[in-house]
Image (cartoon, rainbow, N blue to C red):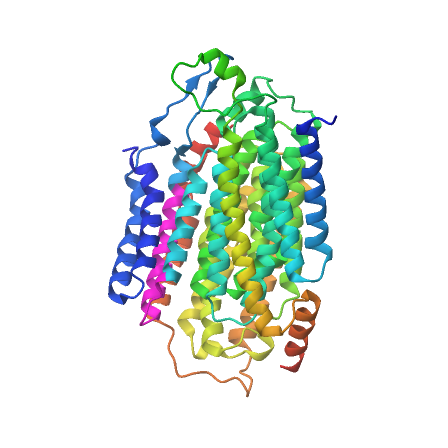
Amino acid sequence: MLDLQLASLFTVGFLIVIGLFSAIFIDNVIKKLMGIAFIEEGVNLFIVTLGYKEGGIVPIYLPGMDANWFSSTAAYPLPYGLVLTSIVIGASTLAVMLALTMVLYKKYGTLSASKMLASREESELNE
Amino acid sequence: MNELIPIMVIIPMTCALLLSLFSNQNKLIKGLAFFVAICIPIIPLLSNYGLHYFGGHAPLISNLTGVLYHPAVTYSFQSLQKLFIFLLGILVFLVVFIYINSYKKASGPYLFLIFMGTAAITALMLSDDIFHMFIFFEIAALVQVGIIAASSIEDRYETALKYMIMGSIGGPMLLLGIGILLAITGSVNITDIVYAINHNLVSMNSPVFLLACGLIFFGWLYTSGLPPFHTIKSAVYSKAEPHAAALLQAFTVITLVSILIAMFRIFSNLPIFEALLVGFALLAMILGISMALTQNDFRRMIGFLAVGELGFIVLGIGLNTEFALTAGLFQAINEMIVTALLFIGFGVVADLIKTSDIRKTGGLIAYYPKLAIMILIGGFSMAGVPPLNGFQSKLMLIQASLSSGFPEISIIAILVSIATFVVFVKVFYAMFLKPKPNDLVIPNKKVPRSTIFAMAILLIMCIILGLFPSIITGYISGFVGGLL
């Protein structure tokens, strides 16, 4: 059976590649943003995977615990702390991008990036 | 007073929140913004050099490995941080001064963005923790998008979204690189990572370490607006209000310098690292000036020139000698001052005549003579004309590249400076000297006094630093000695 950490790293690679493809090659702005969310979640999953320890315990030191046993058994807590902040940042970035997409949809009446560009170039030529 | 180190971040951040909270009370937010804008450059002058450990958690020695590590987020305040945060404070003061004098009703959310961006960039400069730097860089990127969206210039939303989409690719790559460093060193504290590398706890030639270097380098290219992200960065500058563009480019320069110093500390032992830096520096210089030469929009042109000037900073760091590093960091200080001056000057002209197309302008020297003279001197400084500050830093960079055994680099630097001069003369002639086109309407409006005041301050700084560069280089060389 595939090791959980290795499987997780494959998933990270898969998410990032799909996300990059979507963000770069797909014309629909919403789908681009979905691709970006894939990339962000892929990176978050990578950081979570770093802290994984097979058979590890939650890294909270309770009274009565043996310090040596705890330090050899507990999962590494730093990645979990980091990933929480990263999720918040990712969510706010995505929210701002969606808000900007709404404004642009109202302006151009389309979600196609190429049609938006063509419409802008046309209006520049008319000026 | 080491307690003042975190205060440099806390004060603008608290001010930002208060400005947003009391956004309906015009007089209060104007007064508060002005007061805090005065305090921001004063705090770094009062603070002592040193380290601040959040939560009071000082470094510990691990029982298991015997290695010294930092359990808390650490802020490091040295002479370079003092210089950059002081200069950022001066720019924030000038920007806030222009803003509150230009608008009868100040916008709380807009001032929130200015102060939150200041707090984020200050934290970025102080932090000795690479993940902390990433977080504040992301906050600064969101602030920049907000500032563009708040401007009144057409196509601002398109530029803001494009910048965010590119950032959402560049940012996670930076985070992935940080994650890999965390995986191989077990820490995100830069001092701890450097310790692990210097004590051979990490193999520098391992593909994973090289991958981390590549990913962080890619993320840094985005944060700094270096190629391939130079077009979007120059578009960002051209879509912001004039005073905001001045602040945004200062944010970019400080972001570039702080992440570059972090990368330099971690990766400078990799032979490929210096080559990468010099390569991208030359690319930025050449692409920046080439694209500026083809522009008809003078705001966009200044944006590209600003990107080209970033190349000079990176070149100094990439040459990796004490003199070159000092020259590169001195160039960063000069770029912040000169580009701010030009963004404000050109932006005000564009606001007054309602166009930034040099084919539609002309004869403006008769209407705005003071502005023309200040823009002229600023442009000369950027091109490296003596005795201005740009000349001093560029001369140092050319001397550094010659003494490092790269005369071809110094030739490229001289050619780029000449091309900058040509671009500037072309645009100055088109705007101020050639006959006024018949269809150009000059409004019966004077240049705001606050703008003239801000530009005059920046101009005085250009001249003083040009005549007495040792005021700055003394601080920088003290820091560089410690870095090497």
Q: Is residue B326 visible in the rendered structure shown here?
A: no
User: What secondary structure is the stretch in magenta mostly built from?
Assistant: helix
Residue B187 vs residue B12: left or right?
right
Query: Does residue B248 belong to the magenta stretch?
Result: no
Q: Position of residue B343 (x, y in %)?
A: 48, 62
Q: Nearer the viewer, residue B315 or B426?
A: B315
Quadrant location of the N terminus of chain B? top left
Above or below: residue A33 compared with residue B399: below
Residue B55 vs residue B31: left or right?
right
Residue shown at the point (39%, 36%) measured from the top left: B79
Above or below: residue B39 compared with residue A59: below
Q: Is residue A117 visible in the rendered structure shown here?
A: yes
Q: Position of residue B154 (x, y in %)?
A: 54, 72
Query: Does residue B102 belong to the magenta stretch?
Result: yes
Q: Position of residue B378 (x, y in %)?
A: 47, 60
Residue B46 vs residue B156: left or right?
left
Q: Nearer the viewer, residue B363 or B189?
A: B189
- Stretch in magenta: B83-108
Residue shown at the point (42%, 32%) measured from the top left: B73
- Residue reaching furthest bottom? B438
- Give the number of callouts: 0
Residue shown at the point (52%, 56%) measured from the top left: A95
Above or below: residue B472 compared with residue B64: below
Q: Position of residue B432 (x, y in %)?
A: 51, 74
Residue shown at the point (53%, 32%) measured from the top left: A79
Above or below: residue B377 compared with residue B65: below
Q: Nearer the viewer, residue A68 or B223?
A: A68
